[in-house]
Image (cartoon, coloured by chain):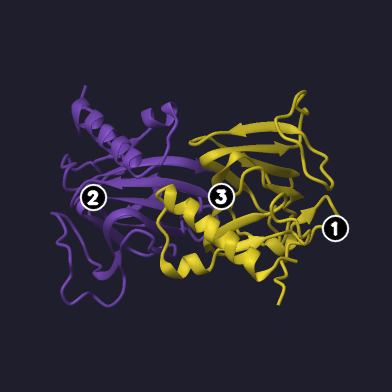
Chain colours: A yellow, B purple
Amino acid sequence: MITRRELEDAQAYAAAALDEAGIVLTDAERTKIEVADFGLSRLHDTGLQLLVYVNTDRCCAKELVLRPGQTCPEHRHPPFDGTPGKEETFRCRRGLVHLYVEGEPASEPACTPPAGVYTVAHEIRLEPGEQHTIPPGTLHWFQAGPEGAIVSEFSTQSRDELDEFSDPAVRRTTIVEK
Amino acid sequence: MITRRELEDAQAYAAAALDEAGIVLTDAERTKIEVADFGLSRLHDTGLQLLVYVNTDRCCAKELVLRPGQTCPEHRHPPFDGTPGKEETFRCRRGLVHLYVEGEPASEPACTPPAGVYTVAHEIRLEPGEQHTIPPGTLHWFQAGPEGAIVSEFSTQSRDELDEFSDPAVRRTTIVEK
């Protein structure tokens, strides 16, 4: 659960970060920036701000905005409706992001995960202009560097409600305190 | 056919436009900017500069860069391999672009097409932050405004070689003069 104030602060943070990066939004889009606390009520360490540009039954594009050190918790995108599930490409636009996926664990990982369940530790460092594509069904999590990050996500259809999180305490829905 | 000089000038134009818009490329990407003259050898009025970020068998993302007044000629994306064909969303990032699609023709269109075959005239004006999604199989063409344009394209798999152009003189391949 987050407070109304936390929601509005996070939206304002994301809008300002996108503006500083030269990414132009319409007025309507600025009001539609989503804030996810993943049900943990610790938005500053585990959370995400995102704007969905388009999400049809075939493809999807979003901007993801992370505060300094903020983490998107470990999850995977399962098959659905006869498809292999969501395939996604993360392209770093600003700041720095470390992406962790299945594979050989980093011997000296750059990031420490926040409280929760994190099982994969193969590290991919993405600076602006760098990108990585994640096949469907792959466990992954990511954390922004000390200046935060903006990441463009290009993918097949996004069905957030199907995401499978490693930590059973995580929920994809965010409740805003009345 | 374009000259080596035209190719290099167009790549440099696109790289500079993307840089000015705050869109960061890697050094490798800057060398991979494609220049299409659509076989017409009139790059300044009919042509396109583009950078493909990712193109898998499921989804694709590109940046399109147009010079002032430059036009991407009328075409459609046909079905292939049991799919309905390419669905694409154009999101204007910088400058101005007019997109023309099937539908009620504009009574006073903002653009005049260059020499060639242009049959659709339903006008969609896109300023930075505005976007439009084109279903597969829809005839469309677009022209940049007086300051050029940068357009992000989010789509299903791109198979440029299958594009069907209204003008039989148009080719998707560009030959660079030795």
Q: Chain of mark 2?
A: B
Q: Are marks 2 and 1 on the same chain?
A: no
Disc 3 marks a residue whose amino acid type is: Glu
Please, is residue A104 above or below residue A102 in the view?
above
The residue that disc 3 covers is A153
Residue A103 falls left or right of residue B19: right
Extreme residue toward the right, this view: A168
Rate crowding at label 1 as few (under 14), some (14 to 19) or many (20 or more) other CA atoms within 10 Å. few
What's the residue type where badge 2 is placed?
A: Gly
Q: Secondary structure at mark 2?
A: strand
Q: Describe the element under mark 3 as helix, strand or loop.
A: strand
- In percent of the image, x 55 and y 46: which residue is there? A151
In the rendered view, does B52 fall on the left or right side of A77?
left
Disc number placed over residue B148 in the picture, else none: 2
Q: CA distance from mark 2 to mark 1?
A: 49 Å
Comparing A4 with B166, the one in front is A4
Q: Position of residue B91 (x, y in %)?
A: 39, 57
Residue A174: where, in percent of width, then height? 71, 66
Q: Give x and y (percent) for residue A87.
A: 63, 49
Query: Can you identify the residue that label 1 sits on?
Result: A169
| Label 2: few (<14), some (14–19) or many (≥20) C-alpha neighbours in 10 Å | some
Where is residue B24 drawn, in percent x and y?
Answer: 42, 37
Q: Which residue is found at the position 19% from the left and 27% from the top?
A: B5
Dot 1: element = loop
Q: Could you tell me the amino acid type at mark 1?
A: Ala
Front-most of residues A53 and A55: A53
Q: Are marks 3 and 1 in contact (CB under 8 Å)?
A: no
The answer to whether residue A54 of the structure is visible from this angle is: yes
Crowd rating for badge 3 (residues with CA inside 10 Å; few <14, some 14–19, many 20+): many
Label 3 or label 1, whichever comes before in sequence order: 3
Q: Going by the image, does A54 lie left or right of B126? A: right
